[in-house]
Image (cartoon, grey):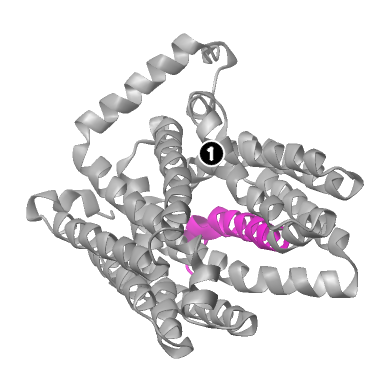
Amino acid sequence: MEESSFNKWKYPVILLTSVGISGLGDFIYLVAINILVYQMTGSATAVAGLWVIGPAVNVLTKFWTGSFIDYRSKRMIMIVTDIIRAVLVFSIPFVSSIWGIYIILIGVSTAKAFFNPSSITYITQLVPKDIRKRYNSIQSLSMSGAFIVGPAIGGALILIGSVDTAIFMNAISFLISAILLFVLPDQEKIEKDSIPKLTIAQVKLDWLVVFQFFKEQKYVAIVYSAYLATIIFSLAMDAQEVVFTQQVVGLSEMDYSLLISITGIGAITGGVIVSIFSKHLSLRYMIAIGISMVTIGYLIYAFSWSFLSITVGFVILGFFNAFLNAGITTFYQNNVPAMVMGRVTSMFQLIQSFLQIIFVLLVGAVADVIPLRITIIFLASVMLVVAITLTVIVFISSKKMYFDET
């Protein structure tokens, strides 16, 4: 590796390692916390409550997190929130009340609400523009790997030790992530005297800044909003995945577990391909092909009648999701200024979480009245319309400059 190339990748590699370890810990924790809550309560509703906490916290916090993030060191916010999550997760095995667990998880989700916008902004600041696409491709691969390896490690730790062992391992992963972030440089000099107080007036002012950005950069807002729309539709379908595969298609729990593993392998394969060939793929094609094929995967899933047909759909959507994620993330980082990225990201995540809660609850309610297959087919079809629209928008010749990578 040439010296210049080494210098370019020295810090991004450390950041990738930090994010990868943290992501791996998240998936270990996902298995453990679901089992722990079910062991404590024996209630499926109590377990379902775990999936509402994150979006609900986002809705309550994203109004103002961006106002906090953009005026402070993104790296320090990431370090502090990693440490907070480590302490909170470590304390879970010592809590005997389910409500105590929920309170801790609200704290973890609140810390994550600060971490995510800070992370995407810090990546934009640290990683040079000409290697962002490659970086995001590798990060997509690491997240896909964590999706497969994390639950497997979590299951092994629970078998060898206990649920508590897996939870402690997650806490350690957050600490390791924080230590690695300490090695990285700050990318901004912030004068303490210049930091505005976090007041309602300041939050309102920052919202106006975000709306002004949307007004000036309509194309960026439309492209990213269309992408988020497909995410919301996919999450609504995912929420009914177990019911659909087992009650509608007739798969067993073993079939479903195997299906998820195969999907993860497809995602890892896609991540490997896109990380190797990202230099030869334009952002436009990564986004267009990614969104189109992911949607086709969901359509195959919606019309599936057997394990084989669902597997084909899931492998396709898993494989091409890597292309879509790397492409849209790079597009976003290249077109949203770092100085307002925390506020803009928080606004998008607020809207996404609010709509996600509505859609998940709505689909669940509709499924009790209308056959679930019809509901899933409808969602996949609407997702296809959005995907086609996004593909057309991406290839508008006069907007080519938005996909410049140099």
- Above or below 62: residue 243: below
Residue at horizontal 49 percent and vertical 12 percent from the top: 200
Residue 96: % across, % down = 90, 45
- Mark 1 residue type: Ser
Residue at horizontal 58 percent and vertical 71 percent from the top: 145
Residue 283: % across, % down = 27, 61
Determine whether the residue tagged by mark 1 lies in a helix, strand or loop.
Answer: helix
Q: Is residue 351 visible?
A: yes
Along the line of sight, the residue nearer the viewer: 160 or 45? 45
- Total label count? 1
Residue 129: % across, % down = 37, 51
Residue 193 in which image quadrant: top right
Residue positioned most to the left: 398
* Side of 360 where 18 appears, left or right: right
Report the span colored magenta: 1-29
Q: Does the magenta run of residues contain 21?
A: yes
Residue at horizontal 88 percent and vertical 50 percent from the top: 93
Residue 11: % across, % down = 57, 53
Along the line of sight, the residue nearer the viewer: 282 or 56? 56
- Above or below 86: residue 201: above
- Above or below 294: residue 118: above
Residue at horizontal 40 percent and vertical 20 percent from the top: 206
Q: Does the magenta run of residues contain 223?
A: no
What is the crowding at mark 1: few (fewer than 14 residues within 10 Å), some, or many (at least 20)? many
Query: To which residue does mark 1 refer?
Result: 118
Secondary structure, magenta segment, majority class: helix
